[in-house]
Image (cartoon, rainbow, N blue to C red):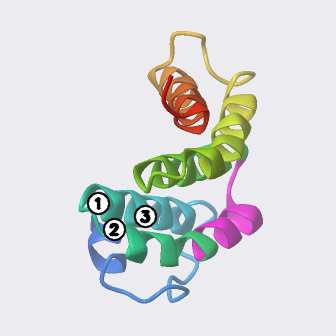
Amino acid sequence: MIISVAMIAAVTIRSRPGVIREIGRNSAVIAARVRVGALRELGRLREADQHVPAMVDLAAKHANPGNRARANLEIARLRLTQGRGGEGLPFARRAVEALEPTQIPESALLKSARNVVVACETATAGPA
């Protein structure tokens, strides 16, 4: 049976932090990242924030470098959405550093990561 990321996210978005069991080397990390992103998109920022520690822990233990970079990028996006771009900047920079050697320069993911870095830097700088 093939389990899609969307199916995992649909199940895990209703769960409490820390209840994801390892589904495979990267599947749990992907599910956690999708859950945080979905909650961010729904505007449920506090709830998304509660799931960040579990996502970070899963990414550190089980993710390949690409999925760790994507987890960092999701944290940066969440912090930016929360108006905390300065806190998101180190995560965005780590994502870019991890992605640059593995992605072609025109890759949408790398461009997105670079845009998040710029957005965090702009948010940190404050009004001109």
Magenta-tinted stretch:
54-64
85 left or right, relative to 66: left
Q: Which mark is residue 36?
A: 3
Q: Is residue 56 left or right of residue 13?
A: right
Q: Is residue 15 left or right of residue 80?
A: left
Residue pictured at 60% horizontal, 38% vertical: 124
- Tell me which amino acid carries mark 2: Ala
Type of amino acid at the residue the image marks with label 1 = Ala
Residue 98 x, y percent position in the rendering: 73, 34
**Disc 3 or disc 1, which is closer to the eye?**
3
Report which residue position mark 1 lands on.
Answer: 6
User: Farthest residue toward the front?
Assistant: 128
Amino acid, disc 3: Val
Please determine whether, in this image, residue 85 is positioned above or below residue 112.
below
Mark 2 lies on residue: 9
Q: Name the spot of residue 72 as percent of width and height, x first.
A: 62, 49
Q: Are marks 2 and 1 in contact (CB under 8 Å)?
A: yes
